[in-house]
């Protein structure tokens, strides 16, 4: 009478989240039949052929300096120490730099060409250089927001104020989850907490089943996974069976499908209780893998970030749609050299290892990797405490570098050119909304058609802007 | 496997829309169906068709390039960013004609076929004839048609319909509902059983489950009015206000952090929350509730309490990051306030009109900025406001103070008049800047700085232990030879100033000043201060330390410590600072700590020579008083001068010491608490339409006013104030306010409103399911003095409300229950989930009002700000109601947000009600709920003599307020048998413990029914 399968098939009727329906379908319990979400029916196919199925998005919050990492500026170095050209000073707006005393500041780091593509990288990224032929480096990203929080929210949600769904939520909303035992949108953090906190992975006005689930740094990766003391695992299973049976009695009386969804969710929660610890158990990974990612490095930040990179691959392997990895803060108004050296040491090796790992497992073709901050840093130096060695750079929204790899992205290319000082864009600008439109495109979605009606208006990730940057796309699909 | 990407159906609609526009551009006449229009009209229509053909693709319903819309009369007349495209009767001067001819730099349309010369001629003729838009019938989707939308019509009381099954009805509400059901040949559900009713009523009115006694009483009481008496009891309980305040907080995006960039704590935002709770408990009529929140500072009988009510407007998000453009932030906050007010009271999505005229509702961009203008002159003001408890002490203290003052001022001090005559001879050499660059006027510690008409700067808001103040101004002199800094008393505040330290003390620890020509900002020049002269300095401190930059004196300086008394210092520059056509930037450091920062101060500069500066270190208000003949001075002025004189010449004077003691004692007993309020800024501000929502791009100037659809602009009085706005919103002639308010009450009692889009009563929203009932309730609400309790009482006493929520066979005919043939069954709100479990476990602490509590979230980085805001609260605060869990906008509480509590980032007229696996994990394992289950399981084991079956029944009834059915008992007995067997088999295994009754309790607490209101 209380067969679990019977409970679950009842559960599918009227379930509000889309993800659940697909999980159950994957379970083989039910054929996928025209699932209907609460916000209208869904397209039965994507807008275009999808190239990417998963995304790992590295959010380098605090804003890394493109001039010291990806966008070499020899002319700037030549004019190092000179005052800002009037044409620039006129309209410039800084958070902290005193315009009057500001000086151009070349990068102290050496750049070299790498790979067949000849993409130039700074000496701060000695490992990433092995991967340049997989990457498209966009040197002309620009944003509207001059400050961290709005900039971060804009990069994640397409709009600089709180309240909109983030990219991962939109993807999960549009495509559903493809993981049976895990949430479809997972957030990994290490180091300092990102300024905007969970508003960066909010589902906004989309149903909260689409919000990013932030795994914890230590202990159980998902909150409240562990049964409390006094509850053995068999007692827990019996208890869940009783809960489900009692809920089913109520469902039969009230004919309320919400109870069916409740039953299904207790089952998914139960699966996550076992899948999540398995996910975070890295002991099954080979020693080679551990070493490649740098899991055992001495520094705790280095270790945690490496662990997150490896976790990202494991999440994608298990079907998770969108993994967001945060690292910061790159906000180096002072001591930029030290700050960037340290964070590059944290990030460079594991990111390169992840790209190579994905490639060798044949996962890179369907996994889109993105690396971005909320904006870049000025070619002008900042010197706050009068120590001539402790210089930094201010916020720079006009032109900064992001890069993409895998998932239908051109292999080994540079898009866009900035002027000789790195102040403004010369060609191929890519607004943050353009980047978002392009990412959705790679997933087979038209950013103008992935919409949600809320408060009397149709909303989309790219707000009222955005266009797909064709130059980023690989000419032929990587898989079909 | 293949997965299908999904996108909502409405995308197809968008596609169709753009095709529609495309067709319109091809087929002449589609937007304007052939009619029997008059001849003159057909000429006009020809012109319109040309516009439709060539222009509306970019200037039509879908897009309004340059803010211009050419598919209706109002768009044509209002024009776009650069004004109307035509001058009537003068095609020569009409920009439209120049553009379509392409005579200037640009040509329209920018792409596609140009207009033929014949077409241009039609437009020329049309404009020369006066450019009359064709006959009214042919206006497409203009203001006129949307003004006829139901919600903009006056509320008329419909007659109560007659019904066949009259015996079912309990009041008028039921007649409206039943008459509709009878038309559909449907019957209402039977009345819910008693356990369900008492539980439903308790959750709906108090947000808590009923106590076991309440359930028992209700079950046993056989009197006819037992239900009504229960309603009265719940309405009168303080928990009623806690529950219903939360609905209002949702609509008004309440949170206890600033949002945006640096998500600072709002340490006394709870004052406004408490105001809402007590207003609702006191059943403050809704019009008064409205007036106090929108304009509590402007009311004739304004009190501290009505000013606290304006804390509503402080719910707008604010940004505190360095380098922000304060003007831009002001605009954002003002937009937020405008949209919030539109949503909370009027149910309109006015925010759409920030950037362009509303596409669907009759709200033009001009209307939006007219509303915006009401809030444009607001400034935030954190006041000291006594809590209700402290009010009496304040009154007593003020009387004592006046008595002491009267005794003190009986006669001038010895030598005072002689000193006064010297003061009178001082030259008037000071220039007080009154215009500050608001971008530069700021405090490093995020305090708020308000410029006043007298040039003084009042500081309130956030108080950090140290602060730095910056200001920039343009002096009208060509060189600065000296600067005067006044640290000023502030009689308007309990605190009295001049500093914000414990005793009104303030220490200026450093000063720096620089200037740069306005046109050459790179040529920066720094001032060198030679000496400082003060009228007074606390002993142990040396004013000269302010001039030193060395590390060891950094925390010393000019210290004043007289509560309620101003002092001044004069800094001499050598060489003088050339400031011709220059900006002067001044930075004042207050780095000594303990909050010894200024409460009010003023600066002045002079180009008078060094000789003229002797004796000039004296506050301007003292000099003004001294200029008055002695006999014309008020007691207050006499006291001020005498006290000032004593303080600088005879600080040990016994009368003075006595006076100081009284002053300090009074300030100490007031025990006032801060409150966030707003007030009108002193500085007038003109409001302009922000073209495309960009505040840099000024469009037409607007005056404060309401949207034209509600009143012709001509009929509106000039100089409308916020109070007029509040009166208009609250007036019985406003068609929206009462409907929106009634609908939100209905929503709280049925889980869905009569209008199911409570945030959108416009044309994109859903129409009411029972329009007559909505209007009848709105009218009844107004007739009964806008009493919310009356309205709620009326609804919960109806037969409609008391129906069962079991979905019978009728449910398939009406799955969404639009016709109300049953009650709705829905999950409790997040706070009630929490409160319910804590309540049933006996852990809930009921304590009305006061500061909020916030549990640090897992992995959250602590900040000084939040620690300060949460530390003083006791450990047990975590067992208070969910209402008292502070919302931090960027890091919401994990438990509450898992159950869809709003994060306060935007208004939330309707909460989502999701159902997720994370909710399951939270109810199973969240530490708070584990504590609750544990406490309840211990409680359930007494008395020890009970058999397991009896215990199960007791526990079940305790949690769910009803007896279990035999089936239900059986399931739990089976579970008990499994657990008992496992426990027995594990007796020898000490490492793995099993707590049988804890598991049993946790099982029951996790039932869907536990967190559901049926």
Image (spheres, rainbow, N blue to C red):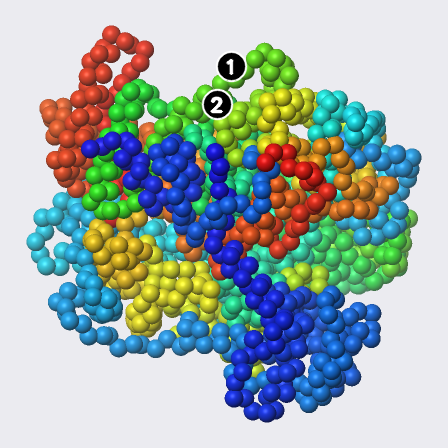
Of callouts 1 and 2, the N-terminal one: 2
Foreground pick, A2 / B648: A2
In the image, is residue A430 above or below residue B1001?
below
Answer whether labels 1 and 2 touch (C-beta < 8 Å). Answer: no
Q: Residues within 10 Å of mark 1 (few under 14, many from 20)?
A: few
The answer to whether one can see residue A91 in this image is: yes
Q: Which residue is mark 1?
A: A284
Expressed as whole percent of the image width and height from the top left, the position of residue B215 reads 16, 45
Query: Is A218 above or below relative to A146?
Result: above
Q: Is residue A306 left or right of residue B89?
A: left
Q: Position of residue A453 (x, y in %)?
A: 49, 55
Q: Specify whether B716 is left or right of B123.
A: left
Pick out the residue farthest to the top.
B988
Q: Nearer the viewer, residue B811 or B586?
A: B811
- Please give left or right for residue B312 compared with residue B167 in the image: right
Q: Position of residue B523 (x, y in %)?
A: 89, 49
User: Residue at image x 81%, y 42%?
Assistant: A417
- Say if B156 sits above or below A477 in the image: below
Rendering quarter of residue B134: bottom right
Q: Which residue shows up at 74% across the image and 55% down it?
A: B603
- Residue A279 disc label: 2
Q: Is residue B254 left or right of residue B479?
A: left
Farthest residue, direction bottom: B39
Spatial separation of the CA atoms under disc 1 and disc 2 = 10 Å
Residue B399 image position (x, y, % from top left): 46, 58
Find numbered disc 1 in the image and state the secondary structure of the residue it sits on: helix
Q: Between A470 and A198, which is closer to the camera in this rendering?
A: A470
**Tag 2 secondary structure:** helix
Numbered disc 2: what chain?
A
Mark 1 vs mark 2: same chain?
Answer: yes
């Amino acid at each position: 009478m209380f067969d679990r399968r019977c409970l679950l098939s009842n559960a599918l009727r009227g379930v509000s989240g889309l993800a659940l329906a697909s999980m159950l379908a994957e379970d083989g319990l039910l054929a996928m039949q025209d699932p209907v979400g609460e916000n209208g029916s869904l397209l039965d196919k994507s807008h275009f052929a999808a190239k990417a199925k998963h995304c790992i998005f590295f959010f380098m919050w605090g804003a890394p300096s493109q001039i010291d990492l990806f966008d070499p500026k020899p002319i700037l170095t030549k004019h190092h120490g000179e005052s800002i050209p009037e044409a620039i000073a006129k309209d410039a707006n800084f958070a902290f730099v005193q315009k009057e005393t500001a000086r151009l500041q070349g990068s102290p780091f050496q750049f070299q060409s790498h790979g067949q593509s000849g993409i130039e990288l700074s000496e701060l990224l000695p490992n990433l250089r092995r991967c340049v032929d997989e990457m498209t480096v966009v040197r002309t990203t620009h944003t509207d927001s001059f400050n961290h929080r709005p900039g971060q929210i804009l990069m994640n949600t397409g709009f600089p104020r709180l309240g909109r769904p983030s990219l991962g939520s939109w993807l999960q909303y549009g495509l559903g989850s493809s993981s049976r035992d895990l949430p479809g949108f997972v957030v990994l953090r290490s180091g300092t907490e990102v300024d905007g906190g969970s508003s960066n992975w909010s589902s906004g006005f989309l149903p909260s089943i689409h919000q990013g689930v932030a795994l914890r740094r230590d202990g159980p990766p998902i909150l409240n996974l562990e049964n409390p003391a006094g509850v053995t695992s068999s007692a827990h299973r019996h208890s869940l069976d009783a809960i489900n049976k009692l809920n089913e009695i109520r469902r039969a009386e009230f004919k309320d499908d919400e109870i069916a969804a409740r039953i299904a969710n207790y089952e998914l929660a139960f699966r996550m209780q076992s899948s999540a610890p398995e996910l975070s158990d890295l002991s099954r990974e080979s020693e080679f893998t551990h070493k490649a990612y740098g899991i055992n490095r001495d520094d705790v930040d280095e270790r945690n970030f490496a662990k997150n990179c490896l976790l990202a691959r494991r999440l994608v392997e298990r079907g998770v749609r969108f993994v967001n990895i945060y690292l910061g803060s790159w906000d180096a108004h002072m001591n930029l050299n030290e700050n960037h050296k340290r964070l590059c040491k944290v990030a460079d090796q594991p990111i390169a290892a992840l790209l190579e790992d994905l490639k060798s497992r044949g996962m890179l073709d369907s996994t889109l990797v993105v690396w971005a901050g909320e904006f870049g840093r000025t070619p002008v130096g900042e010197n706050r405490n009068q120590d001539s060695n402790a210089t930094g750079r201010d916020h720079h929204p006009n032109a900064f570098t992001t890069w993409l790899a895998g998932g239908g992205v051109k292999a080994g290319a540079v898009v866009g050119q900035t002027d000789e000082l790195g102040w403004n864009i010369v060609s191929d600008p890519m607004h943050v909304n353009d980047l978002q439109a392009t990412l959705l495109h790679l997933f087979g979605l038209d950013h103008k058609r992935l919409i949600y009606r809320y408060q009397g208006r149709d909303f989309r990730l790219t707000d009222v802007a955005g266009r797909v940057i064709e130059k980023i796309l690989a000419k032929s699909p990587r898989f079909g | 496997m293949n997965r299908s990407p999904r996108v909502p159906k409405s995308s197809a609609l968008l596609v169709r829309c753009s095709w529609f526009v495309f067709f319109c551009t091809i087929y002449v006449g589609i937007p304007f169906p052939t009619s029997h229009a008059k001849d003159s009209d057909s000429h006009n229509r020809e012109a319109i068709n040309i516009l439709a053909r060539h222009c509306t693709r970019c200037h039509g319903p879908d897009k309004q390039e340059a803010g211009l819309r050419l598919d209706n009369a109002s768009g044509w007349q209002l024009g776009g960013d650069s004004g109307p495209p035509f001058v009537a009767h003068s095609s020569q001067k009409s920009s439209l004609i120049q553009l379509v001819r392409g005579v200037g730099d640009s040509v329209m349309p920018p792409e596609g076929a140009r207009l033929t010369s014949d077409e241009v001629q039609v437009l020329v003729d049309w404009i020369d004839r006066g450019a009359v838009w064709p006959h009214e019938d042919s206006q497409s989707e203009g203001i006129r048609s949307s003004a006829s939308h139901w919600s903009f019509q006056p509320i008329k009381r419909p007659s109560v319909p007659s019904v066949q099954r009259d015996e079912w009805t309990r009041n008028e509400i039921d007649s409206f509902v039943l008459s509709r059901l009878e038309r559909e040949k449907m019957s209402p559900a039977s009345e819910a059983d008693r356990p369900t009713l008492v539980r439903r009523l308790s959750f709906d009115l108090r947000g808590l489950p009923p106590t076991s006694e309440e359930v028992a009483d209700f079950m046993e009481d056989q009197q006819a009015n037992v239900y009504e008496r229960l309603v009265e009891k719940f309405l009168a309980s303080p928990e009623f206000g806690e529950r219903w305040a939360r609905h209002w907080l949702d609509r008004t995006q309440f949170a206890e952090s600033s949002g945006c960039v640096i998500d600072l704590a709002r340490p006394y935002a709870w004052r406004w929350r408490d105001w809402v709770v007590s207003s609702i408990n006191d059943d403050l009529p809704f019009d008064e509730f409205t007036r106090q929140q929108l304009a509590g500072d402007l009311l004739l009988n304004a009190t501290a309490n009505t000013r606290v009510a304006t804390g509503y407007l402080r719910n707008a998000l604010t940004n505190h990051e360095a380098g922000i453009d304060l003007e831009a932030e002001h605009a954002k906050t003002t937009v937020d306030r405008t949209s919030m007010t539109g949503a909370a009271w009027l149910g309109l999505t006015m925010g759409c009109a920030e950037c362009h005229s509303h596409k669907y509702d009759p709200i033009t961009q001009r209307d939006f900025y007219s509303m915006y203008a009401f809030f444009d002159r607001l400034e935030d003001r954190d006041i000291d406001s006594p809590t209700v408890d402290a009010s009496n002490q304040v009154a007593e203290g003020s009387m004592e103070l006046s008595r002491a003052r009267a005794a003190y001022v009986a006669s001038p001090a010895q030598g005072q008049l002689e000193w006064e005559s010297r003061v009178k001879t001082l030259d008037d050499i000071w220039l007080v800047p009154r215009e500050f660059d608001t971008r530069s006027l700021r405090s490093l510690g995020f305090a708020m700085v308000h410029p006043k008409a007298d040039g003084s700067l009042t500081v309130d808001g956030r108080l950090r232990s140290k602060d730095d103040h910056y200001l920039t101004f343009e002096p009208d002199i060509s060189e600065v030879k000296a600067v005067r800094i006044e640290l000023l008393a502030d009689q308007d505040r309990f605190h009295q100033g001049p500093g914000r330290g414990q005793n009104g003390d303030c220490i200026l620890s450093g000063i720096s000043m620089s200037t740069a020509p306005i046109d050459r900002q790179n040529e920066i020049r720094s001032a060198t201060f030679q000496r400082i002269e003060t009228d007074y300095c606390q002993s142990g401190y040396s004013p000269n330390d302010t001039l030193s930059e060395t590390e060891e004196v950094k925390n010393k300086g000019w210290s004043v410590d007289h509560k309620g008394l101003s002092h001044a210092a004069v800094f001499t520059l050598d060489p003088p600072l050339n400031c011709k056509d220059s900006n002067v930037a001044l930075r004042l450091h207050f780095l000594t700590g303990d909050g010894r920062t200024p409460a009010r101060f003023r600066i002045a500069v002079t180009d008078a020579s060094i000789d003229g500066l002797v004796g000039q270190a004296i506050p301007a208000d003292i000099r003004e008083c001294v200029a008055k003949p002695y006999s014309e001075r008020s007691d207050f002025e006499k006291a001020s001068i005498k006290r000032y004189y004593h303080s600088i010449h005879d600080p040990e004077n016994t009368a003075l010491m006595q006076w100081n003691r009284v002053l300090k004692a009074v300030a100490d007993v007031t025990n006032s608490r801060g409150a966030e309020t707003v007030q009108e800024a002193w500085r007038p501000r003109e409001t302009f339409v922000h073209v495309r929502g960009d505040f840099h791009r000024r469009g037409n100037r607007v005056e404060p006013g309401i949207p034209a659809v509600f009143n012709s602009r001509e009929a509106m009085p000039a100089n409308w104030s916020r109070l007029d706005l509040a009166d208009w919103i609250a007036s019985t002639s406003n068609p929206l306010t009462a409907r929106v308010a009634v609908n939100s009450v209905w929503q709280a009692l049925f889980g869905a409103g009569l209008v199911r889009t409570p945030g959108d009563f416009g044309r994109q929203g859903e129409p009411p399911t029972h329009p007559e009932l909505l209007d009848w309730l709105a009218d009844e609400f107004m007739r009964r003095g806008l009493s919310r309790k009356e309205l709620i009482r009326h609804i919960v006493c109806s037969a409609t409300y008391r129906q069962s929520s079991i979905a019978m066979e009728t449910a398939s005919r009406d799955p969404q229950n639009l016709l109300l043939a049953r009650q709705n069954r829905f999950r409790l709100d997040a706070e009630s989930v929490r409160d319910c479990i804590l309540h049933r476990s006996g852990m809930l602490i009921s304590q009305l009002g006061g500061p909020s509590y916030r549990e640090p979230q897992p992995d959250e980085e602590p900040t000084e700000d939040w620690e300060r805001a949460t530390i003083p609260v006791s450990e047990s605060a975590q067992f208070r109601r969910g209402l008292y869990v502070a919302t931090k906008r960027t890091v919401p509480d994990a438990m509450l947000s898992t159950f869809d509590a709003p994060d306060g980032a935007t208004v939330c007229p309707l909460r989502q009600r999701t159902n997720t696996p994370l909710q399951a994990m939270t109810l199973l394992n969240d530490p708070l709920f584990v504590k609750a289950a544990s406490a309840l399981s211990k409680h359930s084991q007494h008395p020890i003599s009970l058999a397991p079956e009896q215990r199960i029944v007791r526990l079940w009834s305790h949690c769910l307020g009803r007896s279990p059915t035999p089936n239900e008992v059986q399931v739990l007995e089976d579970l008990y048998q499994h657990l008992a067997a496992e426990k027995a088999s594990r007796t020898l295994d000490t490492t793995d413990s099993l707590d049988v009754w804890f598991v049993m309790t946790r099982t029951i607490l996790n039932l869907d029914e536990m967190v559901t209101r049926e």
